Amino acid sequence: MIKRLLLFIVLAYLALFLFVPIACIFAGALKNGFGVYLKALGDPMALSAMRLTALAAVIAVPLNLVFGVAASWAIAKFDFKGKNVLLTLIDLPFTVSPVISGMVYVLLFGAQSAIGPWLTRHGIKVLFAPPAIILATIFVTFPFIARELIPLMKAQGKEEEEAAATLGASGLQTFWRITIPNIKWGLLYGVILCNARAIGEFGAVSVVSGHIRGRTNTLPLHVEILYNEYHFAAAFAVASLFVFVAFLTLAAKKLVESRFDKIRSRSVV
Amino acid sequence: MSIEVRNVSKQFGAFNALKGVNLKVETGELIALLGPSGSGKTTLLRIIAGLETAEQGGVYFAGEDAQDRRAKDRGVGFVFQHYALFRHMTVFENIAFGLRVKPKNIRPSEDQIQKKVHELLKLIQLDWVADRFPSQLSGGQRQRIALARALAVEPKVLLLDEPFGSLDARVRKELRQWLRRFHDELHVTSLFVTHDQEEALEVADRIVVMNEGRIEQIGTPDQVYHHPVNPFVLNFLGNVNLFHLRVGGKEQNLTPVYVRPHHFEVHRSPKEGSFKAKVQYVNPAGSMVKLELKTEWGEVIQVEISPETFQQLRLQKNEEVYVDPKHFAFGGDYAI
């Protein structure tokens, strides 16, 4: 009886907050027919937004990968002063509202800032241009990979690296042959999460973008603009892309997770 | 290769792990570093390996200062307590690792690597597990693989950190004897860390007894067991009873004495020099019968007697017996 009741609550909850909205997206997207749906996706503005979003993700994810591995490597395998401060700093983007993160860049690069006039004089456009969007995306997504790797690397300890060192391996050899193979599934998992967030980021990007159509609009911003201009079908059509990305992410996540769990259970002695 | 440790000190924060340790290990020796946990024995081993750096003092390999040589250049084989096998590699690849990471000009060919690894697998009697992963092996097998991996690069020195620490009692005993035979064949200078005095006494040529970051005594198993230089060594190597005996028959002359459990004789009737005690507990399991006795002045002592003596005496709980310590140490002399 209790089991049924619980199941009912969970399913009703999921239906209300997940299935119905997703269904609405597709209903809205296909309301005016499949032709309109395809046209909305093929629109030059939409394509340009896709390109910008892809560019931001393609730059942010690899950079955060390098940063995440370096940070977790340092935190998990070395002792140094200020380790806890570093850990807290890595969590910062999680605790700060994305809008505030965007504001920081406006204050940093805007016309009123210390370096703003210098940038303008030299013709470097950061704010309301792709560089700021990329910077904001990097900022909001940098904890994902580090957060995934730190507990994993801590749990694995540094004995295998020490063993490699006593066997004559150099630092680089140890890194590529021991450390990376041991963390690769956790790393991939972090990359998937980081990528999902990079593609979907709205708040921080919205503040620094300037919403210049065809130039500084990312996909989430494009959806907002379409919606605000009452192009509901087109807005939902573009939004449906995110549903596909979400499904892809979930599938990839599931795949990596099962692999990862297998590795983890194997590593438990 | 001989190893010399000169005046080495090491701190972890406010904790003094090592306080001016001096030690010389001769070529081909098998040395046990014995001590309770926190005594600094593992730290000393890791400093010799180059995995930790000493704040003071130095380590010398064959008389040469190893200060500036990193772990990878020291040519030591290190065996970790928890094996530290590479979990994503097969047993074969684990053992081959040290050969594969050698600089190109001195790296052996694939054929040579194959040959060497199989030789080592045969040596440790595990050539049938080459293609398995470490997680598919038992603890004892893993530890032997770890040893083979360390030996693959032909180290001049072998360092083992509690090599049998996480194995069950039977495997432990087996591997211990195996290590001894192994060392007798290879004669590579070896140091192993242990907190198990039985292990140290059974395997090592010499034992280094450590406590609180200092070396208490260095000597052969016979020396440290029969001629301990202080109460700590006496206490740590084998069980010992510390109790107080009236010397000269007067109340105020209570002298602390140390007696090993098997150095007591137990009688039904008083003998010269014996004292009265009450049987509190009897444990007849094992090669010796273990008794817990309470002396007439209230101290509890542990006594071991042979099963034959036990049968003759037919001891019961709460019976009174007379105890005669055959060998004991007191005052400044700890030789028993």
Image (tube, rainbow, N blue to C red):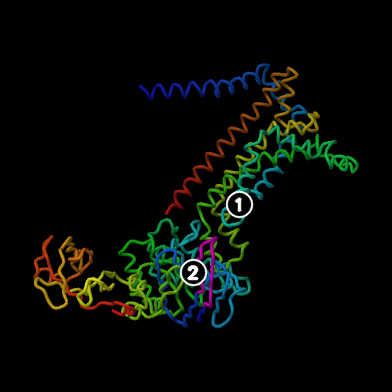
Q: Tell me the SS state at disc 2.
A: strand
Where is B253 relative to A17, above or below?
Answer: below
Going by the numbered disc 2, the residue's amino acid type is: Phe
Neighbours of disc 1 within 10 Å: few (<14), some (14-19), many (20+): some
Q: Answer with the quarter of the image where residue B68 lies.
A: bottom right
- Res B184 visible: no
Which residue occupies 71% across, 24% down?
Answer: A224
Which sits in the foreground, A257 or B245? Answer: B245
What's drawn in magenta, residue-wise? B5-20
Q: Position of residue B262 (x, y in %)?
A: 22, 73
Q: Position of residue B18 (x, y in %)?
A: 50, 69
Are discs 2 and 1 located on one and the same chain?
no
For label 1, the residue is A83
Q: Position of residue B73 (x, y in %)?
A: 59, 72
Nearest-to-viewer mark from 2 and 1: 1
- Res A84 visible: yes
Neighbours of disc 2 within 10 Å: few (<14), some (14-19), many (20+): many
Which residue occupies 30% across, 64% down?
Answer: B170
Total residue callouts: 2
Q: Main secondary structure of the magenta part?
A: strand
Q: Position of residue A139 (x, y in %)?
A: 69, 41
For label 2, the residue is B78
Which sits in the foreground, B75 or A245? Answer: B75
Q: Tell me the SS state at disc 1.
A: helix
Residue B17 colored in magenta in the image: yes
Direction from residue A82 to residue A105 in the image, left or right: right
Which residue occupies 39% across, 63% down?
Answer: B165
Q: Chain of mark 1?
A: A
Where is A137 relative to B265, above or below?
Answer: above
